[in-house]
Image: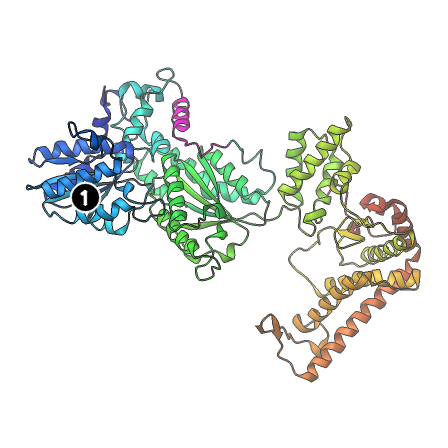
Amino acid sequence: MTILIPEDQLPTDLSVGQAVDVAYASELADTAADLIRGLPVLLECDKDMTPFVFMSIRNRLKAANLKCLYLDGRPREATGAGDMNCGFVATMLTQLREAVRGAVERRVVVLPYLDLMTTSQGGLTAEAREFIPLLYENPELVWLGFKDPSFALPRVIENLFPHRKSMLGVPRKQLGKLVTRQESRKFGRQFKPWALDKFVSGVNAVRLRKLLVTLEGEDYPSSPKRAHAQIRQATTSGQLEIPDIDLETQVGGYPRVKERLRKEILDVLQIKDEQDSPAEIAKLEELIPKGMIFWGPPGTGKTLFAKAMATAIGAAITVVSGPELKSRWVGESEENLRQIFHRARQSAPSIIVFDELDSFASARGTYQGSGVEHSMVNQLLTEMDGFHKEELVFVVGTTNFVDILDPALLRPGRFEFLLHIPHPDADDRRAILTIYNDKMQLQMTESALAYAGRRTGEFVEGAAAGTQFTGDHINALCRAIARIRLRESIEEPTDERLIDRALSEWSERPQLTSSELQVVATHEAGHAVCGLFCRHAPPIERISIRGDVAGALGYVAHGDHAHKYIVTRNRLLDELCVLMGGREGEQLLLDDLSIGSVGDLERATDVARALVETYGMGGDEVGVSYAPTIRHAGDPQRTYSPDQLGRCDTRVREILDEASRRARDILTENRDLLETLRDLLLEHEVLDAAALRRAAPQAPPEKIVSETQ
């Protein structure tokens, strides 16, 4: 393909028929040659192409003295009123019967509406059962069938056509011959067909001509952007949208995810657009993955990243829900997939997002449903394998469970690009909060932003309790703040108290008596004091006895460990001490124990057993790993003798006793601080990092989260 075409080398005028002849010259010549040799041909093209393709082929066949009969279902003149009342398909069937049983010479019979012979589920219509035998009845007839790319034909019809041609889109090498001189002036003084191809790669020659003649604007503009925008708008079907989401300014955080998306996809596409060599363009197109999996927890912005990618490359996007594609009718699910890909190709550049891809693309052999998933996976693979390298159609599958996807989807050439979008970390949450703060005009102070970032590092309260905060949860928090500010006409900046209200104002909390609150406050203070004086425990961020976390009357929120990926024996021993701190605090100040510490005890027992049996850190006498090696129905099958089992159990109990004694010693030594924290919790219910720092000046500074973190 020529990169630059001088205006004087372009045609001055071009009809639609001429455009079809030029765009598909090779396919039309091959089709005519096959028909002359007596070989049936099936042409795949859009409906609006059919009459122009037929006329071009008919003109070629005339030169070979081969007649054509076009069965379009329209009543012939002077056939009487009876035929005028017949239906479209019935009339076409009558014409076919007359052609088959009345023909005595060789001729080409054109079937432009083969798709009418199938139901929406891919089965045969009642007329087709009479139609198909007629196709095999007269050997003197040569069939030319037209297949709409949106519909699948039954195998019994396709078998009639040993030769098949496809006329989808416009061949890139022919594109420069389909633009007139006047139309080229709308793109500037230098017409670059390859730049136009990006926006019309899925548009056929007929539709392309209709688009080009409607271009508006001045001649020889400094940039072709206006002409490209008009074409982009015209090629976007009703079910696709052109998003406007900037990857850098409107998607908060996730710098590593953005960097990979830029380097692997966006930068390569940009370099391709800047090339002047057809060979270089073709080489770069081979590098771009067309199938992608965006995976991660719900609400982390997988679809948002797909829309930002679409914005960056000027692509239209359609988001398809996996469950919605399924149908109870045989063949309809596959038909839905075909329609989606067909629309996307016509609107290229485009992105198809299959939300919840795992709902129908789980590994084959694991389906629990009707079996339609198997056919849908096969159809999806067929569509993706049919991509041309120059087509800018990307397929993005989003899923929470990438490990259960069918392996056939993940091989190179299909969904080969996997992008993990995890829960947002502290920096990501701060960036997301900043975007919503500006967008919703929440007027958060710097300290409030930092506080909101720390609070959203905890678990979500309410119905979604027990899950980590995602971008969607942060958006919900900011909208809750905005609603409070609106209904109370708050004009002051948003502070920490308002953030707390938005997070837990409507949470259902247990109503504790004063004596019950005393137990909870003592328990949490015990955890906190032990955490402050255990060197390898994470820093404390917040202590609460509000009961604002499901399943817990109180809790101590910790910051991140200094080392995120290396877990040492001392760290686990400190964790045991902190876990035992709640029980020992109750025993020290109340001389009693509550059953509320059962969760701490269970967790401590698991950690101690892992130290002994899994990590080989229980002591020299049991310094061997006895991790389970075989599992049956979820039960571990251990590999040690009864004698060794007893030794392990004894060592586990010793480790727990040592942790209890250590916690008791810390609390006894810091009893005044324990009582102070208990009393402050009873008074305020919540102690943040600043309050804790004031209450415990003797604690190491690094054991309390900094307010700027």
Amino acid residing under circle 1: Val
- Badge 1 crowding class, 10 Å Cα cut-off, few under 14, some 14 to 19, many 20 or more, is many
Q: Can residue 646 be seen in this view?
A: yes
Displayed quadrant of residue 392: top left
Of all residues, the one furthest to the top in this rendering is 218
Q: Is residue 87 above or below residue 620?
A: above
Judge by depth and name the residue closer to the eye, 521 or 656. 521
Q: Can residue 577 be seen in this view?
A: no
State the quadrant of the N terminus.
top left
**Magenta span of residues:** 222-243
Residue 330, position as x, y percentages in the image: 39, 51
Q: Is mark 1 on a helix, strand or loop?
A: strand
Q: Would residue 437 be found to the left or right of residue 41 on screen?
A: right
Asked whether 232 falls inside the magenta stretch, the response is yes
Q: Would residue 518 be found to the left or right of residue 610 on screen?
A: right
Displayed quadrant of residue 427: top right
State the quadrant of the C terminus.
top right
Judge by depth and name the residue closer to the eye, 263 or 675. 675
Judge by depth and name the residue closer to the eye, 499 or 565. 499
Asked whether 411 falls inside the magenta stretch, the response is no
- The total number of labels drawn is 1
Residue 704, position as x, y percentages in the image: 79, 49
Residue 473, position as x, y percentages in the image: 65, 42
Q: Which colour scheme is used?
A: rainbow
What residue would you read off at disc 1? Answer: 41
Displayed quadrant of residue 486: top right
Residue at screen point 85% across, 57% down: 523
Q: Would residue 136 be found to the left or right of residue 416 on screen?
A: left
